[in-house]
Amino acid sequence: MLQLVAAHRSRLALATCRGSIVVEIAHAVNYNPEWTLHLNASSPENDPMPKALCILGMAVAAILLLLFGLDLGLGIPFGKVSMMMNVGFIICAVVLAYLSWSTFREQT
């Protein structure tokens, strides 16, 4: 939900946006049709970008987990330079994978 503050003749109105059109204006201020703001934002149901970004996040997490997991276990890409760095990146990759997966499930 997007909230916008509109100023008109030294009065403030709090407008609440649901979807692409502002549908409410605070009751504390006298309603004036000039205050209505229209937004041309696409709705989450029609926008494929959030799903693509979630999938991209899961792919990046998988690549990080593979690279630093192999380095921790076999020392292939980086030669086991720092075990703490490997463990830190593995933890970050797991967190990124979890956040991407949970956000992807909310999208559907």
Image (cartoon, rainbow, N blue to C red):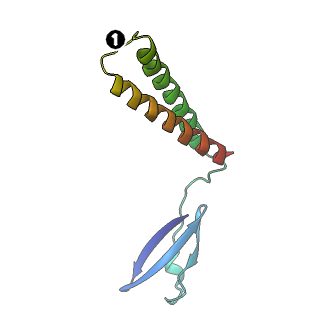
Quarter containing the N terminus = bottom right
Q: Quadrant of residue 90?
A: top left
Mark 1 neighbour class, 10 Å CA radius: few under 14, some 14 to 19, many 20 or more: few
Q: Residue at x 49, y 20 (%)?
A: 66
Quarter containing the C terminus = top right
Q: Residue at x 49, y 28 (%)?
A: 60
Would residue 48 be visible to someone looking at this image?
Answer: no
The x and y percentages for residue 27 are 55, 87
At mark 1, the secondary structure is: loop
52 or 59: nearer the viewer: 59
The x and y percentages for residue 89 are 40, 29
The x and y percentages for residue 18 are 60, 65
Residue 30 higher or lower than 45, as above or below: below
Residue 71 higher or lower than 52, as above or below: above
- Point out the residue furthest to the left here: 81
Left or right, 23 with reference to 60: right
- Point out the residue furthest to the right here: 108
74 or 100: nearer the viewer: 74
18 or 84: nearer the viewer: 84
The x and y percentages for residue 57 are 51, 34
Left or right, 81 with reference to 17: left
Residue 32 higher or lower than 23, as above or below: below
Would residue 43 be visible to someone looking at this image?
Answer: yes
- Residue type, label 1: Gly
Residue 47 higher or lower than 52, as above or below: below
Q: Which residue is mark 1?
A: 79
Q: Residue at x 57, y 43 (%)?
A: 50
Tell me how many marks there are. Answer: 1
